[in-house]
Amino acid sequence: MKRNGNLLTVTLALAILFFAGNQAKGQTTWVAPASANSLKNPGSCDAATLKAAKTIYTSTCAPCHGAKGKGDGPAAVALNPKPADHTSKAIQGESDGSLFWKLSEGKGAMQAYKTQLTDKQRWSLICYLRTLKK
Ligand code: HEC
């Protein structure tokens, strides 16, 4: 009986560690609907657009995503899951439409920016995200 009790304790402890470990990685699989891939930027990523986007990024996104987009902004410490690393292969590998959709809809700590920023501003941020490639 005693032995079974210990075994149960060990099993529970392992299960908790496993769960905590997965949480600590702070990675989720956030997949935009397939239809998002067909969204196209109606504007261009010219110098003026990138400059304006950088201003928005620095004030609005950097607190969580970091000044260079690495997901290491000051507010990131308290967040789980962690803000995405915009320089990562995974994010850079996504379509513009998918990133635009996520930025518009939000998830968890990240709000739905379709109510905060215009379409033009959100597309400009997608242009800017592409400059953060490693
Ligand atoms: C309050 C913190 C916070 C702010 C501010 C914030 N984000 Fe996020 N963002 C997150 C978190 C957390 C995630 C990860 C959500 C998840 O995977 O559950 C995320 C994910 C994303 C993703 C999706 C990455 C993927 O999985 O493909 C994009 C794109 C993104 N953010 C862009 C932005 C942009 C651009 C801004 C500024 C307009 C911004 N975020 C502002 C916290 C934030």
Image (cartoon, grey):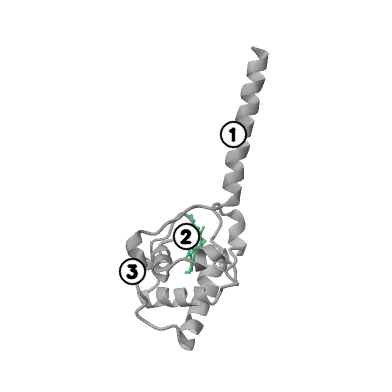
Mark 1 crowdedness (10 Å alpha carbons): few <14, some 14-19, many ≥20: few
- Whole-number angstrom distance, CA of label 1 to CA of label 3: 41 Å
Mark 2 or 3, nearer chain start: 3
At which x and y percent is residue 123?
Answer: 41, 75
Rendered residue at 60%/66% (across/down): 70
| Circle 2 SS class | loop
Of label 1 and label 3, which has the lower sequence position? 1
Q: Count the numbered circles shown.
A: 3
Question: Earlier along the polypeptide chain: callout 1 or callout 2?
Answer: 1
User: Could you tell me which quadrant the C terminus lies in?
Assistant: bottom right
Amino acid under disc 2: Met
Label number found at residue 38: 3
Q: Nearer the observer, disc 2 or disc 3?
A: 3
Which residue carries the number 2 mark? 110
Secondary structure category for the residue under label 1 = helix
The residue carrying mark 1 has its beta carbon less than 8 Å from ligand 1: no
Name which residue lies at 46% across and 77% down: 127
Say which amino acid is labelled 1: Ala
Picture layout, residue 5 above or below residue 101: above
> In the image, which disc is placed on residue 15?
1
Query: Does the residue tagged 2 have its C-beta within 8 Å of any atom of ligand 1?
Result: yes
x then y, percent, for residue 52:
48, 82
- Observer-nearest residue: 98 or 13? 98
Residue 79: which quarter of the image?
bottom right
